[in-house]
Amino acid sequence: MIAYIIRRLLHTILVVFAISLIIFFSVRLTGDPVSVMFQAGEPTKEAIAEVRKNLGLDEPLYVQYGIFLKGLVTFDFGESFRSGMPVIDLIKEKLGATLALAFGGMAVAIMIAFPVGIVSAVKRGTGVDFFGRIFSLIGISFPNFWLGIMLILIFAVNLKWLPSSGFESFKHLILPSITLGMILSGILARLVRSSMLEVMNQQYISTAKSKGISDFAVIIKHAFRNALLPTVTFLGLQFGALLGGTVIVEQIFSWPGIGRLIIDAINQRDYPVIQGGVIFLAVIMVAVNLVIDLSYTLIDPRIKIGGSRS
Amino acid sequence: MKKKLSSLFALLVIFTLILSACSGGGKEKASTDSSKGGEENPVKDRGNEIVIGVSGDPQNWDPIDTFLLDWSTVATSVFEGLVDRTIDLELQPGLAESWEYLDDKTLQFKLRQGVTFHNGEPFNAEAVKFTFDRLLGAEGQKGPQYSNYTSIESVEVVDEFTINMKLNTPDPVLLTKLAGYGAVIVPPKYVAEKGDEHFNNNPVGTGPFKMTSYKRDQEIVLEKNPDYWKEGLPKLDKVVYKIIPEASTRLAELQTGKIDIMKRVEVSQAETVKETGFLELQEVGTPTAFSLRFDVAKKPFDSKEVRQAINYAVDKEAIINEILGGYGKPISTFQSELSFGNNPDLEPYPYDPEKAKELLKKAGVKEGTAVDLFIPGNDGNFKEIAQAVSFYLEEVGIKVNINTADSTTLTSDLIPNAKAGHMYRQGWGGWTLDFDNTAYLMYYEGEQWNPSFKNEKVEELLEKQRASVDPEERKAIFKELTELLYDLAPELNLYSAVDIYAVNKRVQNFQPPHEDRMRLEEVTVK
């Protein structure tokens, strides 16, 4: 097990190195951060060249990459061109909001999708199943910017129950979480339903039923637990994606998350922030994957990981 | 069969849901309609403070590190320059009480006495010297402000409240530039002790309000500066700026009373604001101009007649009225009416497709000639304008292929390297409100955003106006220059932008700024 984790960590270093190469050179392919700094002003060619020089952007690319790699080893992603703040501090600043939204979205998705998926599977072919499936279809098809704006109009503007934007209290988390969770729950409910159906056809379910265990216990203890495996994989990957990929929801609800940080940085060609942000997300993704793999052993004790096989 | 039926039913359900959601929106509109004028103001107990919804966060408050309109919206209340530009764009004494030219290259300022920074540090000649040494030194050269002030050689302290500004070249726009952005005065001791990074997030100036809290990408809190040097000002105790990038969310916050002033109202939202009893719509002309610039190195736009023909072929007024909802002003050269150097005697090219066809025929342009137009991909409104232009040009026999590009790529790569097709969108802030900067950088050979235009007479006039500090003389030169540029038609001039603000009626004396610099000293609430 330990050997396995160490192997995975070495693997992570390789991934980060590969990503650092790709991100470093790809952000430099189009556009120039210096001319964008002058939004309100009108710089001369000389002024632009001067600032480029002062930011070290006139050095040969391999020199710049060397400096970047050197920083990376010490977790120093450099300073943002725009705010002058260390990139690592910017990420730390946003991490709370990002995690809150990711957990909120996941919680909503699970609360909706698990019951809907299970009931759909158990009552397969009935009206309940039918509505369950329609529900997931709707969840999948709603664009989240539309859903977000609709929720604001209904719950903030008309009913005045909830605030429409900002990152202040638990109340502020509700609408963005629902927006994010709705989309996720559509896919998740379908996944739960299909893996439940698969499991329900297994002989051990019939065995369990024939032993006279209550239906509820069969469904939860025997069927659902076994159907959980593919769901956990999906949720884990989604969680990683949620940490960086909720830009639209963040935009609508003025949520100060990492997605917006990176998108703004891309628009401004703020190289250090783009590089640091993407590498941070990559590390998170790899870590989440590792946790998912390890969690398999908890869900299904038959699965053994790494060295303990021998 | 059953499956088919059920999917049909599913479709029906979705359709009904969407319909009901849409009608929900309609109902909402109806309810605001019926309550016009009578709807209760949702803001009740906010006291002597206002909340402003803005679209962006400049990320950095150090004046020498940024050149963003979002910065000036807030920082105008925190920092002050030697010179002040009023909301009506008049220059008046700021932290300097008066100034005079001792000779061509020496400008002497008498400073205001008894002014203190928000941290209690005194404002004096040393602070002014420190500010400009910093701006023109190593720290300033890393940022975008330095290049605006290179005509200043040095600042010398004469006595505690007098400084001499030594210039290396005459600069007719210098006084305007001293009224904002990089030239606002910063506290020497504070910056030296706390360091640049701290100053980025905790700015201290002499302005009517002091910044007491800044949460990046969330909110900025300003509180009244009780020791402000202007007697009795500011009138508000507190101003909060909320950063809300999405326009529909900003409007929702305004409708629910969470904010009092909304910056950047979209044209499509104007009606909703007008229909809401407790809100008021305010519009204001800006110095920002928009055009489609021709790459004159590419055929057929190497011909002046063809460029003029395009100007005749497009109905600019229809574009302003139909697409911009009237929120735009016609321009005859690439500057707004607010710009020094604008020539009010020049009428924009009239809409005359027959004349256009005639000119094109004379220039030998074949029917069906195709040209490439580049526009930024993130501007939906401008896409509609591009489509309208394409329609008008089709009418006179020119086919336009509209290409969209990422806006940063367009401005920083495609345009400077002449890779933006035959014509491309050019948007220009014009922050100095003087044609000097714009025209020089647009039409002087070799400048960043002038890949191909070259005219010796134009360059001669540009140099001549720059060498003079006499407004009358410069005015005469600009008259000649604008007439020449009008005839040469290096671009299809479309409009200068109009900004829309929405304001809760509890806010009194708010005047929308021409160039995003909100002035709040006189604002009160009822």
Image (cartoon, helix red, strand yellow):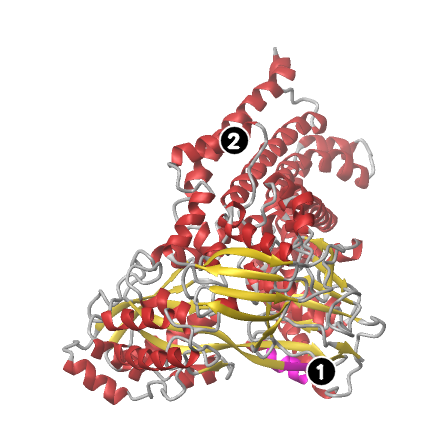
Spot occupied by residue A142 in the image (x, y as percentages of width and height): 60, 60
The answer to whether B389 is drawn above or below residue A35 in the figure is below
Tell me the residue that label 2 is attached to: A16
Q: Which residues are magenta?
A: B269-281
Quadrant where the N terminus of chain B sits is bottom right
Q: Residue at horizontal 62%, vertical 29%?
A: A290
Q: Amino acid at mark 2?
A: Val
**Along the horizontal axis of the image, is A137 left or right of B380?**
right
**Residue B275 part of the magenta-drawn span:** yes
In the image, what residue type sits under mark 1? Thr
Determine the image quadrant of residue B115. bottom right
In which chain is the residue bearing label 1? B
Q: Residues within 10 Å of mark 2 (few under 14, many from 20)?
A: some
Q: Is residue A189 left or right of residue B464?
A: right
Q: Give me the disc on residue B309.
A: none
Q: For this rendering, which residue is in front, B506 or B250?
A: B506
Q: Around disc 1, counting alpha carbons within 10 Å, would you say few (fewer than 14), some (14 to 19), or many (20 or more)?
A: some
The one nearer the camera, A133 or A161, is: A161
Q: Which residue is mark 1?
A: B32
Q: CA distance from mark 1 to mark 2?
A: 54 Å
